[in-house]
Image (cartoon, grey):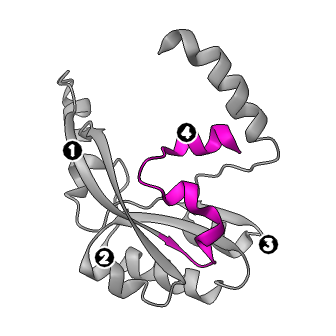
């Protein structure tokens, strides 16, 4: 709600002090991550019609490269990786410490609609995702609790 934006922005800003946000090629980010960092990684979905939903798409080979480089550095830092729940993703990350199933309600605005100037309201979906981690996430249970939202967890931190 717009009337809550100032309070929420200030609260979020306070929580994110010292956090580095990047939007670079994933290999560069992962290779340059310092020891004991925490990386939140949200690549394009594996089973998506990517040209419609992403401005920058991933090829199947990119998904394999991401898995390989994360595995190579799995002891350097902790990561939380979000993906669509598919058998291929589960196979790519079978080496990870844990996979948590999560359902989200979300809206997708297609990039082809945005490019053509179509002003359609995005379609609501219930997504089945995986939260993939390389660390013991038992101490992070609120994040994986199906009753908590990411914002609620951030608010409590």
- Binning the other alpha carbons within 10 Å of mark 4 as few (below 14), some (14 to 19) or many (20 upward) gives few
Q: Quadrant of residue 58?
A: bottom left
Residue 2 on image: x %, y %: 50, 12
Residue beneath disc 1: 125
Q: Nearer the viewer, mark 2 or mark 4?
A: 4
Residue beneath disc 3: 36
Q: Nearer the viewer, mark 1 or mark 2?
A: 1
Q: Earlier in the sequence, mark 1 or mark 3?
A: 3
Q: Is residue 109 magenta?
A: no
Vertical comparison of 93 with 45: above or below: below
Q: Earlier in the sequence, mark 1 or mark 4?
A: 1
Disc 2, SS: helix
Vertical comparison of 18 with 124: above or below: below
Residue beneath disc 4: 151
Alpha carbons under labels 3 and 4: distance apart = 24 Å
Q: Which residue is located at x 34 percent, y 87 percent?
A: 91
Find the magenta span and give its range.
132-157
- Binning the other alpha carbons within 10 Å of mark 1 as few (below 14), some (14 to 19) or many (20 upward) gives few
Q: Earlier in the sequence, mark 2 or mark 4?
A: 2
């Amino acid at each position: 709600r717009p009337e809550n934006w100032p309070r929420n922005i200030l609260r979020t800003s306070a929580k994110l002090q010292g956090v580095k946000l990047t939007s670079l090629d994933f290999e560069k980010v992962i290779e340059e991550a310092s020891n004991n960092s925490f990386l939140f990684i949200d690549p394009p979905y594996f089973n998506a019609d990517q040209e419609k939903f992403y401005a920058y798409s991933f090829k199947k080979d990119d998904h394999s490269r991401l898995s390989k480089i994360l595995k190579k550095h799995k002891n350097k830092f902790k990561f939380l990786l979000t993906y669509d729940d598919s058998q291929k993703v589960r196979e790519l990350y079978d080496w990870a410490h844990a996979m948590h199933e999560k359902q989200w309600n979300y809206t997708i605005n297609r990039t082809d609609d945005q490019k053509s100037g179509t002003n359609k309201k995005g379609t609501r979906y219930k997504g089945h995702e995986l939260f993939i981690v390389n660390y013991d996430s038992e101490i992070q249970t609120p994040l994986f609790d199906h009753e908590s939202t990411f914002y609620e967890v951030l608010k409590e931190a």
